[in-house]
Amino acid sequence: MKRPNFDLNIEVRENEILSKHSTFRIGGAATFAVFPKDKAELTSAITSIKESGMKYKVIGHGSNVLFDDKGYEGAIIFTKYMNNVEYVHRADETLIRVECGRNLTELAGDVGKKHSLTGLEFAYGIPGSVGGAIYMNAGAYGGEMSDIVIESEYYDTLNNSFVTLDAASHDFSYRHSIFHDHPEHIVISTLLKLKRGDAEEIFNLMNKNMSSRREKQPLEYPNAGSTFKRPAGHFAGKLIEDAELKGYTVGGAQVSEKHAGFLINRGGATSRDVLELIEHIQNIVKEKYGVDLESEIIYIPY
Ligand SMILES: Cc1cc2nc3c(=O)[nH]c(=O)nc-3n(C[C@H](O)[C@H](O)[C@H](O)COP(=O)(O)OP(=O)(O)OC[C@H]3O[C@@H](n4cnc5c(N)ncnc54)[C@H](O)[C@@H]3O)c2cc1C
């Protein structure tokens, strides 16, 4: 495999340790970590990587992924510097064009607290990027991205073209969007619709959501959010707690004592520990309750 011929303006790091870029704090070194600042740099980087025959993966803020202990033999492209936001104010609503790397919690805070816009309060406290949130149809407290998306622009890496996708064509459902079925499509930006609201009400709701997270979630330990998707008719955390798995530990990975729906890295957890723990939970819950738990955390193999 030859070395990609990256444009000199693009920030590229060799042998970058991935645990630094994952909220789980797990993962070995990637051959290359690439940090484009805009869509021109992103497409240029992808073209060079493809020409070299190397594999690659686009990552937002690494809050829903598990990198392998061995790392990644290829290029991980991080979107976090693609974070422009443009506001278009109309009579009673505001459209916001947001680039994929923008931090969702910062965005929710800005639009709510600085611009008194309502609709994104649910996202305050979700530690991912806007691109990751579109990919996952991230949601909480009764709201999700699909409620506010008007359209997204994506880069089709097969045809080397930019495409605009209307809201309906995102095929949004619970923690799913069309981008799961098309890994060759990279979300570049999205257009959100928010309404003018009452600043104090927005502020209070966001703070209430954040307090609830702090109270219920094991935020004092590295983790990757909810481990499993909610199975129809059940709550994953409740099933795991009922199966007496709270505190169950494999190596450095543990089912949180605070919230059984979360796995935490108690220190030194490996990807193998986490994968073994996930499999153990799935087996026990299936055995006891006949319910299949599907991992929400995305494992990125070496
Ligand atoms: C403490 C904590 C609390 C959380 N709470 C919630 C919650 O309440 N609700 C919720 O839904 N989630 C929650 N999460 C999970 C996570 O934050 C969300 O799923 C978030 O949307 C993931 O964004 P990310 O940028 O970190 O994605 P990553 O982890 O970086 O990537 C996730 C997937 O998205 C893909 N992806 C990322 N960017 C792009 C792009 N631009 N184009 C195409 N694909 C892309 C990646 O390839 C990968 O497959 C929580 C996580 C933590 C750690």
Image (cartoon, rainbow, N blue to C red):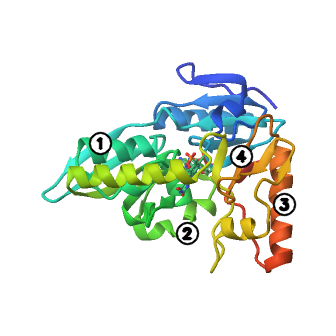
Tell which circle, 2 or 1, labels the residue nearer the N-terminal end: 1
The residue mark sitting in front, 2 or 1, is 2
The residue pinned by badge 4 equals 264
Which picture quadrant has residue 195?
A: bottom left
Q: Which residue, given by chain and number where applicable, does mark 3 sit on?
A: 279
Task: Tell me residue 295's x, y (percent).
Answer: 72, 61
Give the mark, 3 or 2, whose residue is nearer the N terminus: 2
Distance in Å between CA atoms under marks 2 and 4: 23 Å
* CA distance for labels 3 and 1: 43 Å
Mark nearer the N terminus (4 vs 1): 1
Question: From where the camera sits, is residue 147 visible?
Answer: yes
Quarter of the view holding residue 145: bottom left
- What percent of the width, then of the height, locates residue 29? 77, 30
Q: CB of mark 4 within 8 Å of CB of mark 1?
A: no
Mark 4 or mark 1, which is nearer to you? 4
Tell me the crowding category of disc 3: few under 14, some 14 to 19, or many 20 or more residues within 10 angstroms, Cα based.
few
Q: Residue at x 40, y 64 (%)?
A: 166
Q: Secondary structure at mark 2?
A: loop
Q: Residue 273 versus residue 146: which sits nearer the camera? A: 273
- Front tag of 3 and 4: 4
Q: Secondary structure at mark 4?
A: strand
Q: Given contact means CB atoms under 8 Å apart, are the residues at marks 3 and 1 in contact? A: no
User: Disc 2 designates what residue?
Assistant: 174
Which dot marks residue 191? none
Question: Which quadrant of the figure contains the C terminus?
Answer: top right
Amino acid type of the residue tagged 3 in the rendering: Glu
Above or below, comparing residue 284 to residue 222 in the picture: below
Taking depth in this image into account, of 38 and 146 the one nearest to the observer is 146
Amino acid on which disc 4 is placed:
Ile
**Amino acid type, mark 2:** Tyr
**Which residue occupies the foreground of this view, 53 or 272?**
272
Residue 86: which disc?
A: 1
